[in-house]
Amino acid sequence: MKVLILGTGKTGTTVMVYKVSGGLPNCHAFSGGRPGKYVGDYENAVYKHTYEERKGKSFELFREHLDKEHYDRKIWMARDPRDAAVSRMLYRWHKGFRGRKKQYEAHLDLVLQKEKDPQSIPFIEICRYAGFNGWPQTREQVVEEEQKRYQQMTDFVKGLGSNWFLFTFEDMVANKFEALNNYLGFTVQADANVPSASGKTKVIRKKATGDWRHWFTGEDVKLFKPAYMPYMELIGYDCNDWTPDPNPVIEPEFSSVYMQNLPRKAAKNNVLRYLDPIIQKFVKRD
């Protein structure tokens, strides 16, 4: 069987590769790369890809790939856009901050302020410092990027055929796999996680839902609601529930500490990536 898992970053696509492949015998699991990069003649294989316009992985690219390549099962991974926005913002520096230290420090400083008094700074203000093309962005630029992102996503998902299965991050976290298992024709390995691979150290965050309530203020709701509503309605999220937590709590472990650990892990991964070929060379000699 040949399975495709497609979604955007921070929606649970990576861990789902291992949950799905864990339910198939002699299954190969592939994550990332250009669409089709790892396609081969395997007994069973699961391929995961993520949409990211900035990296050239557009929906048009995936449409072209799907026109040429057949998959027996296809899964679209969705996540509440509000939670996804918080997760993406905090994950901004997962490759380090080389050449952008001042931006990183300004971003971190706002997160630290938000931790101390969650209602003092709107979420959008922090997003202004988490961009890739200049900083700080204007609020209008932040909203425009989200509007474009989710409009393209909505159009793409609307065009998916009946042979696709829409699965949510929220159902994954709640271990609701019955409908997915019925679609796949086998039982996924629900307790599978991303393995600790040589040369790469993962930084896992909350694995929870509804975190946006602690980050969004009433001002954020007014700004982001128009951008997210069409996609939320399409996937089936509660479009009437936009109430931030009246007593928000932002835990440093899952915010500023997490942010500071990312560049350290990136540096460690770079060293391991450099050393791994050298180590393998000596292992082969032995």
Image (spheres, helix red, strand yellow):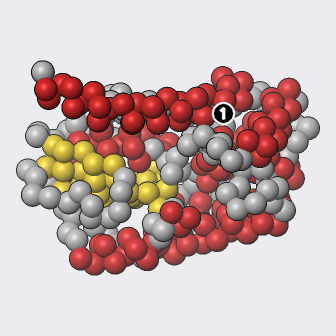
Is 252 situated above or below 76? above
Q: Is 53 on the left or on the right of 243, as rendered?
A: left
Q: Is residue 227 visible?
A: no
In-front residue for pair 134/154: 134
In-front residue for pair 35/231: 35
Q: Is 133 on the left or on the right of 205, as rendered?
A: right
Q: What residue type is labelled 1?
A: Met
Q: Measuring from the top left, give residue 26's x and y in whole percent.
A: 11, 40
The image quarter containing residue 142 is bottom right
Q: Measuring from the top left, give residue 97's x and y in whole percent.
A: 65, 42
Residue depicted at x 81% and y 30%: 112
| Outermost residue, right side | 120
Q: Measuring from the top left, give residue 132's x and y in whole percent.
A: 67, 57
Residue depicted at x 41% and y 47%: 13
Residue depicted at x 29% and y 31%: 278
In-front residue for pair 175/114: 114
The image quarter containing residue 1 is bottom left
Is 147 situated above or below 136? below
Q: How many marks?
A: 1
Q: Measuring from the top left, give residue 159's x and y in whole percent.
A: 42, 76
Q: Can residue 161 be seen in this view?
A: yes
Is 186 situated above or below 256? below
Disc 1 residue crowd, few under 14, some 14–19, many 20+, Cα 10 Å? many
Residue labelled with disc 1? 259
Quadrant housing the C terminus: top left
Disc 1 secondary structure class = helix
Q: Is 226 on the left or on the right of 148, as rendered?
A: right
Is 98 situated above or below 60? above
Residue depicted at x 16% and y 43%: 27
